[in-house]
Amino acid sequence: MQFEKVKKFILDKLKKELAKNLTYHSLGHIKDVFAAAENIAGLEKITGEDLTLLLTAVLFHDSGFIESQKDHERLSCEIAQEYLPQFDYTPGQIDCVCGMIMATQIPQSPKNKLEEIICDADLDYLGRDDFFKIGDSLYSELRMYGILNNELEWNKLQVKFLENHHYFTPSAKKLRKEKKAANLLIVKSKIK
């Protein structure tokens, strides 16, 4: 696997081809999830080929937004399947990457440790200090798509989402559960 080459390739592709009006599903989001995945993987003692496959999946997990917001996980897998063979990834490795990408679909449904890590990394911000800043970028994007009309709808959606979400790995639970609960209380206070 030529990871450094594939990393440069997909980051360049995303930079050029992702719509500039994507305020949340942007290159910044990919880099944020990448850092979170590296952190959680380190805490969960993931190394070697597994770590490479995890980070590859992170790099590709929202690449489908190049084509469409709808069904973007499946489109992200198709992009991975198209390009990863050129960087010496085997069919089995590509299947593993696609399994991780599909696990991030909401509601998340990871079937193994690597899928749990990418799911936790993708929503790491829910339990961080920058939750509201990142949330605002998602709100802007959802408004652009016509999915939400106002802040009350957004806050109600966030409460429902936060109440139904849970982290999967022991590391993410330890790192983010407490702050996520505090963020939920703040969102609830905005509705009253």
Image (cartoon, grey):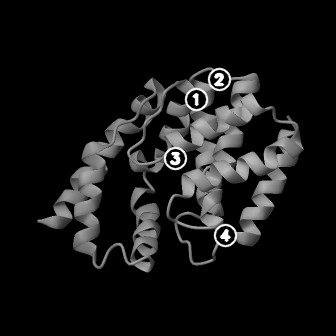
Q: Quadrant of residue 51?
A: top right
Amino acid marked by disc 1: Leu
Mark 1 and mark 2 lie on one chain; the one further toward the N terminus is 2
Single out the residue that lies furthest toward the top. Answer: 45
Q: Give the residue at x 76% y 23%.
A: 48
**Residue picked out by circle 2:** 46
Q: Residues within 10 Å of mark 1 (few under 14, many from 20)?
A: many
- Percent across and percent down for residue 98 are 63, 40
**In the image, is 160 to the left or to the right of 131?**
left
- Percent across and percent down for residue 153 are 24, 70
Q: Are marks 3 and 2 in contact (CB under 8 Å)?
A: no
**Residue picked out by circle 4:** 18
**In the image, is 98 to the left or to the right of 70?**
right
Rounded to the nearest whole Å, what is the CA distance between mark 2 and mark 4? 30 Å
Mark 2 and mark 4 lie on one chain; the one further toward the N terminus is 4
Residue 53 higher or lower than 102, as above or below: above
Amino acid marked by disc 2: Ile
Residue 114 disc label: 1
Single out the residue that lies furthest toward the left. Answer: 192
Residue 45 higher or lower than 41, as above or below: above
Residue 180 at least partly seen: yes
Mark 3 and mark 1 lie on one chain; the one further toward the N terminus is 1
Q: Are marks 1 and 2 in contact (CB under 8 Å)?
A: yes
Q: Give the residue at x 82% y 35%.
A: 89
Mark 4 and mark 3 lie on one chain; the one further toward the N terminus is 4
Which structural element holds mark 1? helix
